[in-house]
Amino acid sequence: MALRVLSVSQNLRQLSKGAELLKRYKATASLKKTLVNIPATQVTRLDNGLRVASEDSGAATATVGLWIDAGSRSETEKNNGVAHFLEHMAFKGTAKRSQTDLELEVENLGAHLNAYTSREQTVFYAKCLSKDVPKAVEILADIIQNSKLGEAEIERERSVILREMQEVESNLQEVVFDHLHATAYQGTPLGQTILGPTKNIKCIGKQDLCDYISTHYKASRIVLAGAGGVKHDDLVKLAQENLRGLENTYDGKPPVVTPCRFTGSEVRVRDDSLPLAHVAIAVEGCGWTDQDNIPLMVANTLIGAWDRSQGGGVNNASNLARASAEDNLCHSFQSFNTCYKDTGLWGIYFVCDPLQCEDMLFNVQTEWMRLCTMVTEAEVERAKNLLKTNMLLQLDGTTPICEDIGRQMLCYNRRIPLHELEQRIDAVNVSNVRDVAMKYIYDRCPAVAAVGPVENLPEYNRIRSSMYWLRV
């Protein structure tokens, strides 16, 4: 009788397992079907070299924007900060619109006009109703081609940027990442801040702004991207009407992107008046187009992020999050994989009490070494699923999709379809993760940036010696 009960129990368990596998298969099949049916990104290149890329979802709203392949990396020490300054000047009036006219026109449409500058890109975009896309494109085209750059507006914006710099200095995460770039890419354009030094902001003039536009705002370096209720053929016509005047010729030699050398080094700004230590440690990662990028993204997801307010404790899947919760190692941490054209920073940023710096760093480096040698298949599968989920969650809305289109067109010269990206992630296995971890992390010189009461952070040689394990 006992044997019969055991046999029935095993059969039920097998059926249950089969049902679970079937359910998982159906969910996977459903996801694949959904990803394949997402509208394709259409791309057209105009005669002057400008690219138009869009995804039409038929929504009632749309986001359109101009992605320009130029940021603070395109600057020199002398004009560092000019790209960001130019972004501020864009909304201060054009040859045909005063600042007031521009603001009223945008407000009357119920639209949102915005811009931002990164180390490699400058972006101007508008969110509006789909019927107002023609007006939005015309405004964006007017802004980048006909900005007035008046002396009075330049002086007024100078003080605004100096005030913004003071605000950034109070955001310690921003400060730490600026220091991290400054030490990791010292002596190269990537080491410069996006806002630029105070002395530059005080002396940037109209000629500097005009020179930057004439050097970098060329048609072949610009993408008009659209997402939401936007028809591609209509967007191409709008680009031909409003952006055909953009030139694609250079006075002299065209600027080239020079490789930025990574230097394993550190910078510490000790300030015992601050309550918490802010620390970032990173190794050199890879560029956008490198084949190692996806495995490094999986490794980055595997380390994860955690905040004390999340709770979780012993139930956290991430080893580092579990240790942080159980032993009160830090207030928060987040791993990052920052990519540029030809290089990148792969690492972690954490905030902790002054006395916990050494213990937290020990756990971080232990986890890194485990990635190189002992990461398991189950962990990699979990990280892959989480990465795919995050990837889809980040594309919720017309603006994130438009940003994704514009960035990928500049980075890859095409938009990678979601189903292809999912296949690339699925193709990563535990061996790939170990291989890229050994290649980029194991026995590499890291860059370290620390701000606050960091007396207990181990000195650089000790940090460097923990980047490998000696085994008998």
Image (tube, grey):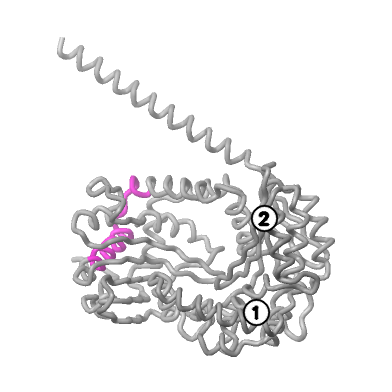
Q: Vertical placement of 442 versus 225: above or below?
A: below
Identify which amino acid the numbered label 1 is placed on: Val
Few, some or many C-alpha atoms within 10 Å of disc 2 (few <14, some 14-19, many ≥20)? some
Few, some or many C-alpha atoms within 10 Å of disc 1 (few <14, some 14-19, many ≥20)? few
Residue 443 seen = yes
In terms of depth relative to the viewer, which is nearer, 38 or 166? 166
Dot 1 lies on which element?
loop
Residue 445 seen = no
Residue ID for mark 2: 111
- Magenta span: predominant SS is helix
Q: Vertical placement of 302 versus 452: above or below?
A: above
Query: On the rendered structure, is 342 left or right of 240?
Result: left
Query: On the rendered structure, is 376 left or right of 346?
Result: left
Identify which amino acid the numbered label 2 is placed on: Ala
In terms of depth relative to the viewer, which is nearer, 190 or 162? 162
Q: Is 378 part of what is drawn in magenta?
A: yes
The image shows residue 124 at horizontal and vertical percentages of 65, 65
Sequence-wise first label, 1 or 2: 2
> Residue at point 79% right, 71% down?
246
Query: On the rendered structure, is 3 left or right of 109?
Result: left
Displayed quadrant of residue 279:
bottom left
Q: Is 249 part of what is drawn in magenta?
A: no
Q: Nearer the viewer, mark 1 or mark 2?
A: 2
Q: Vertical placement of 7 versus 383: above or below?
A: above
In terms of depth relative to the viewer, which is nearer, 289 or 230? 230
Residue ID for mark 1: 256
Q: CA distance from mark 1 to mark 2?
A: 36 Å
The image shows residue 267 at horizontal and vertical percentages of 35, 81
Magenta region: 360-380
Dot 2 lies on which element?
loop
